Amino acid sequence: MKYSLIITAGGTSSRYGNTNKLLEKINGKEVIKYTVDAFLNEVDEIVISANESIINILTDYFKDFDKIKIIKGGKTRQESVYNGLQIANCDYVLIHDGARPILTKEIIKNVKTSVQEKKAVSVMTKTIDTIKEVSPDGKIIKTLDRSKLYNTQTPQAFEFNLIKTVHEKLSGQNFTDDAGMVEALGYDVYIVDGDYRNIKITTKSDIDIAKNYL
């Protein structure tokens, strides 16, 4: 079976600051390089769907890797993933946030195994905080049952024809989660156990956390 990976790198890092968080160095190595390295020996091709402002930089970073392709991302995450699906050549596709550089080989292998059986899977962790539903005016409406709640991470993985069809049917919308798109059309998505260290770097303080984990 052939596996492709789409890395979403199309954001502007607006919540991070004046620099693109994917180019920030942790212990002397760029965030995006950690992300790529985690998958490099686990998939047949890697498509990085990138913000136009960093395409030349990424092209230089990965110029010696034939299996890595750099393409222009879209205005939304959904568009960026679909752009990657347009050129991916595989049986199964993994989709991963470029800003999640802390990923174990075990999780990747479990995702690859599970997607063959389940067709659609998402890495997730059990919610450890008490979650409350709150009204717009700040009033607590109710406390949700924590035992049923999970935090979504990436990678998510899908049978290629399934996720491509889903993206085509839901074209032009603004989903921020590919599993959510699959769910919206009535398909089942299953859990693969994640890792609480698999954080998404969003703010500068996350860099310090990632530095400790890495």
Image: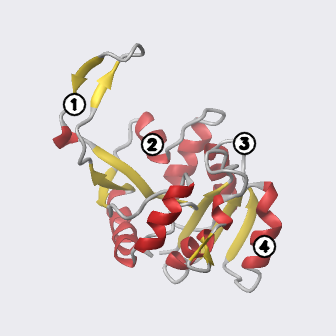
**Residue at (78% x, 73% y) in the render:** 59
Mark 1 lies on residue: 144
Q: Give the x, y percent position of residue 155.
A: 45, 61
66 sits to left or right of 93: right
**Residue at (37% x, 75% y) in the render:** 109
Residue 71: in sight, yes or no?
A: yes
Residue 95: in sight, yes or no?
A: no
**Residue at (45% x, 42% y) in the render:** 182
Q: Earlier in the sequence, mark 3 or mark 1?
A: 3
Q: Earlier in the sequence, mark 4 or mark 2?
A: 4
Foreground disc of the pair 1, 2: 1
Mark 2 lies on residue: 182
Q: Earlier in the sequence, mark 1 or mark 4?
A: 4
**The quarter of the displayed image where residue 45 is located:** bottom right
188 lies above or below 85: above
Q: Are marks 1 and 4 in contact (CB under 8 Å)?
A: no
Foreground disc of the pair 4, 2: 4
Query: What's the mark number on residue 59?
Result: 4
Residue type (three-letter) at the residue carrying disc 2: Val
What's the CA distance linking mark 1 and mark 2? 24 Å
Q: Give the x, y percent position of residue 23.
A: 68, 66
Disc 2, SS: helix
Q: Give the x, y percent position of residue 181.
A: 48, 40
**Residue at (47% x, 67% y) in the render:** 210
Q: Give the x, y percent position of residue 85.
A: 63, 56
Query: What's the mark number on residue 75?
Result: 3
Query: What's the mark number on residue 46?
Result: none
Foreground disc of the pair 2, 3: 3
Q: Earlier in the sequence, mark 4 or mark 3?
A: 4
What's the CA distance linking mark 3 and mark 1? 34 Å
